Amino acid sequence: MEIWRRNLYIVWIAQFITMMGMSMIVPFLPFFIRELGVRDEASVARWSGIIFSGPFIVSFFITPIWGTLGDRFGRKLIMVRAIFGLGVAQFLTGLSQNVYQLFIFRIIQGAISGFIPSALAFISAETPYEKKGYAIGTLQTATSSGQLFSPCLC
């Protein structure tokens, strides 16, 4: 098997599993927030929105920095760093004792993850020019299918 194709399949599996794990959080976030002591329904809804969107807001600003570091130090290194960073952030999220800690850990997640863009950059750089469209399209199916199949496991 060609190296670029092997890389594509390995990264596809990693991205699929990552997206499944990330999507599994969403339905349970309001319950976790209640468990952390927030009782008022309006406050649960507000905290759910803030805590859900926090990592995306931070990653909007941080992801280009990770991309620059990927260009400088290697895309594979940044991709591996992102997946481990995401794992650490998820572990810390599970240790949250209150909504403020949960929010901080989710912000950390947004700052240190960035797996999808780094995976796209890695696959784009490793794939022959005439196969880039196929490779990127295939990799994107990992994101969609991981999010699609995640609720089936809950």
Image (cartoon, helix red, strand yellow):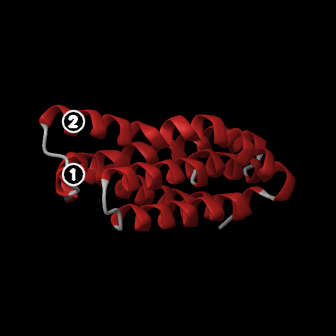
- Circle 1: is it few (<14), some (14-19), or many (20+) Cα within 10 Å? few
Label 2 Cα neighbours within 10 Å, binned few <14 / some 14-19 / many ≥20: some
Quadrant in which residue 141 is drawn: top left
Give how far across and how far down residue 129 sits, in percent: 77, 41
Disc 1 residue type? Phe
Quadrant of the frame with the C terminus: bottom left
Q: Residue furthest right?
A: 72
- In the image, which is nearer the foreground, mark 1 or mark 2? 2
| Mark toward the start of the polypeptide (1 vs 2) | 1
The residue at 31%/56% (across/down) is: 98
Q: Quadrant of the N terminus?
A: bottom right
> Where is 6 relative to 150, above or below?
below
**Front-most of 83 and 11?**
83
- Marks 1 and 2, how far apart at CA: 16 Å
Position of 154 relative to 145 (above/below):
below
Decide which of 32, 123 is in the foreground and name it: 32
Most foreground residue, 22 or 49: 49
Disc 1 target residue: 28
Q: Which residue is mark 2?
A: 43
Helix, strand or loop under label 1: helix
Side (left or right) of 153 relative to 15: left
Q: Is residue 17 left or right of residue 110?
A: left
Q: Position of residue 125 (x, y in %)?
A: 76, 49
Residue shown at the point (32%, 35%) measured from the top left: 49
Residue 52 location (% of width, % of height): 36, 41
Q: Name the secondary structure under disc 2.
A: helix
Residue drawn at (48%, 61%) of the image: 89
What residue lies at 50% left-to-right and 48% top-to-bottom?
A: 107
Question: Which amino acid type is marked by label 2?
Answer: Ser
The answer to which of 119 and 4 lies nearer the viewer is 119
